[in-house]
Amino acid sequence: MLKPIKNNNEYEAALERAYDLIQVDLVSESKESDELKVLSILIKEYENEHFPIPKPHPIEAIKFRLDQMGIS
């Protein structure tokens, strides 16, 4: 039974299970594909709460994109 991820051990177990499911050729709307969808949501929520990625400063983001495009 799937449940919210409460700690790093559960997070690691969820990542391992998701990885295992990704390795299989899943049939759409199967029990396993539904499990992967729910696991993905739970993992994302845990990561957003415990490993947030700060948004870049707008000017730095523009500079980065210009550099990627080769524009000075």
Image (cartoon, rainbow, N blue to C red):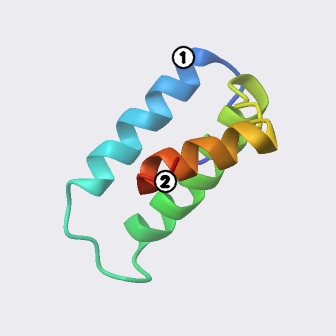
Asked which secondary structure carries label 2, the reply is loop
In which quadrant of the rendered view does residue 48 lie?
A: top right
**Residue that extends furthest to the front in the rendered view of this protein:** 72
Identify the residue position indicated by label 1 in the image.
9
- Of 71 and 10, the residue lying toward us: 71
Which badge, 1 or 2, is on the more N-terminal residue?
A: 1
The image position of residue 36, as x and y in percent, is 46, 59
Residue 32 appears in view: yes
Identify the residue position indicated by label 2 in the image.
71
The image position of residue 37, as x and y in percent, is 53, 63
Q: Please state if 60 lies on the left or on the right of 33 as rendered.
A: right
In which quadrant of the rendered view does residue 4 lie?
A: top right
Q: Please state if 23 lies on the left or on the right of 62 as rendered.
A: left
- Of 54 and 16, the residue lying toward us: 54
Residue shown at 39%/65% (left/top)? 32
Residue 1 appears in view: no
Q: Please state if 25 lies on the left or on the right of 7 as rendered.
A: left
For label 2, count other residues whose C-alpha is less than 10 Å away and answer few (under 14), some (14-19) or many (20+).
few
Q: Which dot, 1 or 2, sits closer to the camera? A: 2
The image position of residue 35, as x and y in percent, is 49, 60
> Contact (CB < 8 A) between labels 1 and 2?
no
Residue shown at 68%/25% (left/top)? 51
- Tell me: residue 48, above or below residue 32: above
- Of 49 and 67, the residue lying toward us: 67
Residue shown at 76%/31% (left/top)? 54
Residue type at numbered disc 1: Asn
The image position of residue 52, as x and y in percent, is 73, 29
In which quadrant of the rendered view does residue 59 lie?
A: top right
**Residue that extends furthest to the bottom in the rendered view of this protein:** 28
> Which dot marks residue 62?
none
